[in-house]
Image (cartoon, rainbow, N blue to C red):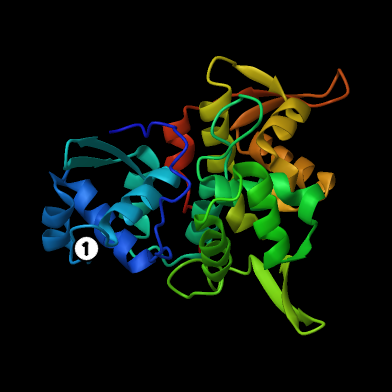
Amino acid sequence: MASPTLNALPLSFPQTFLLDRDLLARLLRFAANNGSGSKEAISLETGIPTGKSTGKVEPMIHYAQGMGLISADKDKSVWKLSLSALGQTVFAQDAGLNEQLTVWLLHLMLSRRSDLNDPAIGVADAWFALFAEGAFRLGKCFKQVDYLAFLQERHGDKAILKTLSSLVLRSYFEPRAFGGAGIFQTALDKGEQSYKRLEAPFQTHFFPAYAVYFYLLWDDLFSDREQLAFDEFSEQTRWPTLFTWEESRSVILLNWMADRGLIQLDRHTGSAVVLRLKMTEHVIAKLYEDLV
């Protein structure tokens, strides 16, 4: 079982290609067999289109890396892919990546912080900037031009940013990307399209996915800590912003995790201190257990 290495992806990793969950599912099938080969060989085996200088194989590999589904190493022109613990469970239980729970978890994973360095950057920084760092700069409602300006503040006036800002937003309305998950809604504001972020679903059958995300963020950023104040965890991971939740909803989720025996809570000091009680693999294995 492979553990994905947490490194920030190149800003331009999508090239000009939206996420395609059909193609991502084919890539997971390839990685499930510890597949290796050049991008051309992977294309031939999976049917994911590619070419000599561009194509969808490597962007899909990077999407899968950013979502924590695979471990991917490249030696010269040869890729070696294997499934992470999360990738194994998703492949076994939702191989087509069709469940809304899966789509929300993949969205959150792509939007996570890369490390605790300052300034904070994301595994896929265009996503992290929008969903984690953009709360004060953009608010819940914004236009593409605002998002582009924010990316330019972070990365300079790079030519790719206009295309990238459009690609990220379009992916939330494309059915084979994140469309249908209810992450954004749009409206016209003085003839211009505006985007409004929606709250993460609060139905309890999503809670196992949020518990997985909680554990994986802890592994990413606090692997040397066995217990942690939830306020510190929230601040460093940008948890409230990622979910667009009021604090009370996070408290309910923490209580649910404690009732399931995943964590222990100590509130004697005021802010909840969280102690992990399970291995991450145990939590991941329960990802789909509450789905009817």
Residue 143 location in percent, x, y?
73, 68
Residue 34 location in percent, x, y?
17, 42
Q: Is residue 235 above or below residue 67?
A: above
Residues 132 and 264: in front is: 132
Q: Which residue is rendered at x = 82% and y = 24% of the image? A: 267
Drawn side of residue 24 relative to residue 289, left or right: left
Q: Is residue 253 above or below residue 187?
A: above
Looking at the rendered structure, the secondary structure element under dot 1 is loop
Residues 292 and 202: in front is: 202
Q: Amino acid at mark 1?
A: Thr
Residues 27 and 55: in front is: 55
| Observer able to see residue 279 | yes
Q: Is residue 37 above or below residue 103?
A: above
Residues 162 and 89: in front is: 162
In which quadrant will I find the N terminus? top left
| Observer able to see residue 253 | no
Q: Which residue is rendered at x = 56% and y = 67% of the image? A: 166
Farthest residue to the right: give it. Answer: 270
- Counting every numbered tag in the picture gives 1
Structural crowding at the residue carrying mark 1, measured as other residues with C-alpha within 10 Å and reported as few (<14), some (14–19) or many (≥20): some
Drawn side of residue 43 relative to residue 165, left or right: left
To which residue does mark 1 refer?
50
Residue 210 location in percent, x, y?
60, 46
Image quadrant in which you'd find residue 17 = bottom left
Q: Is residue 139 above or below residue 215?
A: below
Image quadrant in which you'd find residue 238 = top right
